[in-house]
């Protein structure tokens, strides 16, 4: 091989190595950016679903409660999403399978959000709070002596006012064989399960 050919081959090898190194650097930078982006996305959600189910199982085992939510209080940044759960234990004395529904109702806020705190006097606030909620509104069929869970998601707007927001989580069942309805499941309903509504207090910061 001539000297000129050897020199050309050497230059080609150097060029190839530089290209490979450049590609590796770009790939590393890309992976770093992707990791930081995914990390940023995951921090937008506080997912307490698994913790909630563990705590609810303990609650049913250690108390006489047969309906509960976890957590009952939580501090959340505006624009972030909170995922938690309601738990229902079918411990009906008749030993039969029953149907259950839940309803999540905005009830109160701090005075800085609505004077007097009653959301029924501030329909825009009540409507806004309802839009934050996502949960299963259908019927849950639970066999005797079993527990089931209903995930609940609350996602306040980025521009929501800082302060305290209160919700009632209500559970109703098929009393006297009547199909329960989420819309008609209220704190004063005859077919309420668990004795009373559970209260969620959400503090936006």
Image (spheres, rainbow, N blue to C red):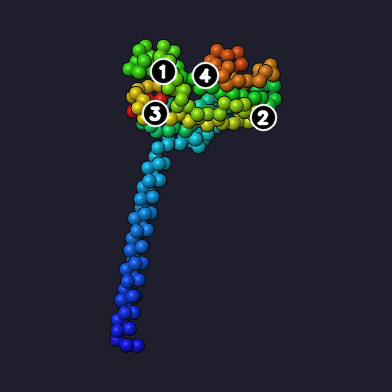
Left-right relation of 16 to 144: left
Residue 10 percent location from the top left of the image: 31, 78
Helix, strand or loop status at disc 3: loop
Q: Which mark is residue 21?
A: none
Residue that numbered label 4 is attached to: 197
Whether residue 15 is visible to the viewer of this picture, yes or no, is yes
Q: Quadrant of the N terminus?
A: bottom left
Q: Which one is closest to the eye, mark 2 or mark 1?
A: 1
Image point (48%, 30%), residue name: 153
Whether residue 108 is visible to the viewer of this picture, yes or no, is no
Q: Residues within 10 Å of mark 2 (few under 14, many from 20)?
A: some
Helix, strand or loop status at disc 1: helix
Residue that numbered label 1 is attached to: 124
- Compare marks 3 and 4 and give the one earlier in the sequence: 3
Q: Dividing the picture into quarters, in which one does residue 47 lie?
A: top left
Residue that numbered label 3 is attached to: 157
């Amino acid at each position: 091989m001539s000297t000129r050919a050897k020199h050309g081959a050497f230059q080609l090898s150097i060029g190839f190595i530089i290209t490979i190194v450049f590609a590796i650097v770009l790939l590393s930078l890309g992976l770093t950016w992707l990791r930081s982006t995914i990390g940023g996305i995951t921090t937008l959600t506080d997912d307490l679903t698994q913790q909630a189910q563990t705590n609810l199982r303990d609650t049913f085992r250690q108390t006489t409660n047969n309906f509960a939510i976890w957590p009952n209080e939580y501090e959340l940044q505006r624009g972030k999403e909170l995922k938690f759960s309601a738990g229902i234990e079918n411990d009906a004395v008749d030993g039969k399978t029953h149907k259950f529904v839940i309803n999540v109702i905005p009830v109160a806020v701090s005075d800085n959000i609505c004077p007097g705190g009653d959301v029924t006097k501030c329909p825009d606030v009540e409507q806004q709070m309802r839009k934050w909620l996502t949960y299963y509104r259908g019927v849950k069929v639970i066999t005797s002596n079993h527990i089931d869970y209903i995930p609940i998601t609350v996602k306040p707007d980025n521009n929501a006012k800082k302060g305290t927001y209160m919700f009632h989580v209500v559970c109703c069942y098929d009393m006297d064989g009547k199909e329960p309805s989420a819309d008609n499941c209220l704190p004063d309903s005859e077919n309420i399960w668990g004795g009373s509504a559970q209260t969620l207090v959400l503090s936006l910061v």
